[in-house]
């Protein structure tokens, strides 16, 4: 659906987007994740032909947005970051304007506007001036505005910014429902990893204009934590003592190694704040628990640590500087 | 009987009109017209426009009344302009209130500046620009529609205002305008619209350049003040050292006057003043200095409309050129701009 090849955008000596290669398939929800100023918005603008790339090419729905931006804009709905409406008109009039701009005759436009207003749950507020809308309402009206043209792709730039958690949840659910129902391709940029994690099939990580990694969240974590994709944390009653010296700690680890000897696939054991971090190549939780209990140790804490987007995020952004 | 036929005819018309209106609902409007419609309705409904139209209508009516009260004294027997009685409505003043033409040349820039100063930057500040430009329209539609909408509003307003003044004049003095007078007035309206269009484009240019509407409004007003007040003073000061002595040759005096006038003609308001004076006062025969040979042997009398038009053609072209330059600059700058939501 969307192909970006070596896309680069430079502002003077500053490189906003650097050699970006990305393919987004039809019907998927793709998350562009990255801190502010990572080049997410610039990438989106280039996909829409609103700004010219310095080098490289983009294809959206098989169309080059540089040479034929109108056709791309006919198929792609774009919700800009911090969307605004004409505050002296009401929500309905604002949407009618967009509908007519998309070449809908007045009668069809009326039907379509009522339909999308209903879809985003804004029918009651439609005759209120948009100047009086709350942030969440504006964002929902923005989504309605995007849906009017019956797009194949919708691009949402930071859509969850400035909405309360309940509003975010509703908004994200709405996006997922729409995407699944109509097979819409959704690109969703955010710096909030939890929002991305909730809805996105695949995620692209942006730092300093580069795509550091892409893939679904399990594969991203596999890619990142290649040596030890699983970490099991355990704590034993006996070593909860103050003032442990180094040798004792070492002993403890050695002791645990002995205990866990029969368990396969353990790559490393570390002790941190009285909690053993056991890294292993596969999910060995039950074997470890069994081994510990069989050795008559008192197991007081057991936790299988899963790498969420949080860890991926921080890991990458810490590493972000190393990449340059 | 006649009345019923009349009413039936009207009803038929209304039915045809409503029918076509229904048909129109099923036809897609060109996106450019959609933007134009919205811009015009926004202008007409805005408080700004209502206030402006109130100011201009009031001042123009006031000047018309002074013209009407003095028009009797203005006509002297044997006056060569006596045949252009009706035009006096627009140019006559008793010194207490400026004439209609002077009002237009004074308030026109204000009208143009206030209709254009927030054309583009308000869209940007309301963050509607990137949303609108993400619709399948060409980028210049927005700028063109903004310009054209303001122009339509201005020209409709001027036509209405001038026809209103003509109507009042017609009722109170009872003398209808001749065909020539009518065309002179029509051309005067075109000229006024063109003049306001220049200021409109200048302020649109500022609105593209400056992010803050206040800055762009102020720049527009500064440019207006500069041209109306300071530019003339500066030209006079600059030309002072070259003032011809009484002993100077005719050729030198002629050159001096021409250069000075040409420098003044950089001002759009000078161009407008010259053009309107010529159009509304048919006795004006030349806008520059005339040598004795040129004047010698001329029969004093008004110029025909075609000749007056010919006389002001350079001025009209100059105004048009200034307008086009401003528009081109804002066009280029707007098309090259990267549209960011913030």
Image: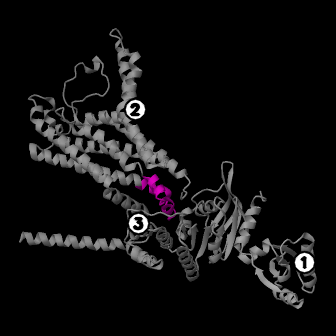
Disc 1/disc 3 C-alpha distance (Å): 64 Å
Q: Which residue is mark 1?
A: A252
User: Is residue A26 visible to us here?
Assistant: no
Instruction: Locate residue B194, reporting x and y percent.
Output: 34, 44
Residue segment shown in magenta: B119-145
Q: Are marks 3 and 2 on the same chain?
A: no
Quadrant of the snapshot with the C terminus of chain A: bottom right
Considering the numbered disc 3 on the image, is that residue within a helix, a strand or a loop?
A: helix
Who's the residue at 85% across and 88% down the image?
Answer: A287
Q: Which residue is mark 3?
A: A132
10 Å neighbourhood of mark 3: few (<14), some, or many (≥20)? Answer: few
Figure check: A87 above or below A274: above
Q: Which residue is mark 2?
A: B266
User: Is residue B272 visible to us here?
Assistant: yes
Tell which circle, 1 or 3, labels the residue nearer the N-terminal end: 3
Majority secondary structure of magenta residues:
helix
Considering the numbered disc 2 on the image, is that residue within a helix, a strand or a loop?
A: loop
Considering the numbered disc 1 on the image, is that residue within a helix, a strand or a loop?
A: helix
Who's the residue at 51% across and 72% down the image?
Answer: A143
| Label 2 chain ID | B
10 Å neighbourhood of mark 2: few (<14), some, or many (≥20)? Answer: some
Instruction: Locate residue A320, reporting x and y percent.
Output: 75, 61
């Amino acid at each position: 659906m969307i192909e970006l090849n070596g896309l680069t955008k430079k502002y003077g000596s500053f490189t906003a987007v650097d050699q970006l290669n990305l393919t987004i398939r039809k019907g998927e929800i793709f998350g562009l994740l990255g801190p502010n100023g990572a080049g997410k918005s610039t990438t989106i603008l280039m996909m829409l032909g609103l700004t010219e790339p310095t080098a490289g090419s983009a294809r959206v729905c098989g169309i080059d947005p540089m040479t034929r931006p109108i056709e791309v804009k006919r198929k792609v709905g774009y919700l800009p970051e911090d969307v605004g409406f004409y505050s002296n008109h009401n929500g309905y009039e604002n949407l009618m304007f967009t509908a007519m701009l998309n070449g809908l005759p007045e009668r069809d436009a009326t039907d379509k506007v009522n339909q999308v207003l209903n879809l985003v749950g804004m029918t009651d507020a439609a005759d209120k001036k948009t100047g009086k809308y709350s942030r969440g309402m504006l964002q929902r009206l923005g989504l309605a505005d995007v849906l009017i043209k019956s797009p194949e792709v919708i691009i949402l730039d930071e859509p969850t910014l400035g909405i309360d958690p309940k509003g975010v949840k509703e908004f994200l659910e709405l996006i997922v429902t729409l995407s699944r129902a109509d097979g819409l391709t959704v690109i969703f940029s955010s710096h909030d990893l939890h929002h991305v994690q909730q809805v996105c099939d695949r995620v692209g990580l942006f730092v300093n204009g580069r795509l550091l990694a892409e893939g679904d969240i399990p594969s991203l974590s596999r890619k990142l934590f290649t040596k030890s994709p699983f970490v099991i944390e355990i704590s034993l009653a006996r070593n909860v003592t103050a003032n442990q010296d180094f040798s004792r700690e070492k002993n403890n680890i050695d002791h645990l190694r002995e205990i866990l000897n029969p368990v396969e696939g353990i790559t490393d054991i570390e002790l941190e704040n009285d909690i053993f971090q056991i890294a292993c190549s596969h999910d060995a939780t039950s074997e470890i628990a069994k081994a510990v209990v069989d050795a008559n140790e008192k197991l007081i804490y057991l936790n299988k640590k899963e790498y969420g987007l949080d860890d991926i995020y921080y890991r990458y952004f810490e590493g972000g500087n190393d990449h340059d | 009987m006649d009345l019923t036929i009349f009413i039936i005819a009207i009803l038929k018309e209304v039915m045809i009109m409503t029918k076509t209106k229904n048909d129109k609902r099923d036809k897609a409007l060109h996106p450019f017209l959609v933007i134009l419609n919205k811009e015009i309705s926004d202008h007409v409904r805005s408080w700004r426009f209502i206030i402006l139209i109130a100011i201009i209508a009031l001042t123009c009516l006031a000047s018309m009344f002074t013209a009407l009260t003095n028009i009797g004294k203005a006509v002297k027997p044997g006056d060569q302009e006596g045949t252009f009685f009706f035009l006096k409505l627009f140019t006559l003043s008793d010194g207490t209130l400026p004439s209609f033409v002077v009002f237009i040349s004074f308030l026109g820039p204000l009208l143009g500046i206030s209709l254009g100063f927030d054309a583009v930057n308000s869209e940007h500040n309301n963050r509607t620009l990137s949303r609108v430009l993400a619709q399948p329209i060409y980028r210049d539609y927005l700028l063109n529609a903004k310009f054209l909408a303001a122009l339509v509003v201005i020209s409709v307003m001027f036509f209405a205002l001038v026809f209103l003044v003509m109507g009042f004049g017609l009722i109170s003095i009872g003398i209808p305008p001749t065909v020539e007078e009518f065309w002179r007035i029509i051309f005067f309206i075109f000229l006024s619209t063109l003049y306001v269009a220049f200021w409109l484009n200048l302020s649109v240019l500022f609105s593209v350049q400056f992010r803050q509407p206040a800055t762009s409004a102020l720049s527009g007003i500064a440019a207006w003040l500069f041209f109306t007040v300071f530019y003339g003073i500066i030209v006079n000061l600059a030309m002072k050292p070259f003032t011809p002595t009484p002993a100077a040759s005719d050729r030198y005096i002629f050159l001096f006057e021409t250069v000075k006038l040409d420098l003044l003609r950089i001002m759009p308001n000078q161009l407008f003043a010259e053009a309107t004076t010529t159009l509304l006062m048919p006795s004006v025969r030349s806008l520059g200095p005339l040598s004795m040979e040129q004047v010698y042997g001329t029969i004093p009398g008004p110029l025909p409309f075609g000749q007056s038009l010919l006389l002001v053609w350079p001025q009209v072209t100059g105004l048009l050129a200034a307008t086009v330059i401003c528009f081109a600059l804002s066009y280029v700058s707007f098309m090259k701009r990267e549209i960011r939501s913030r």
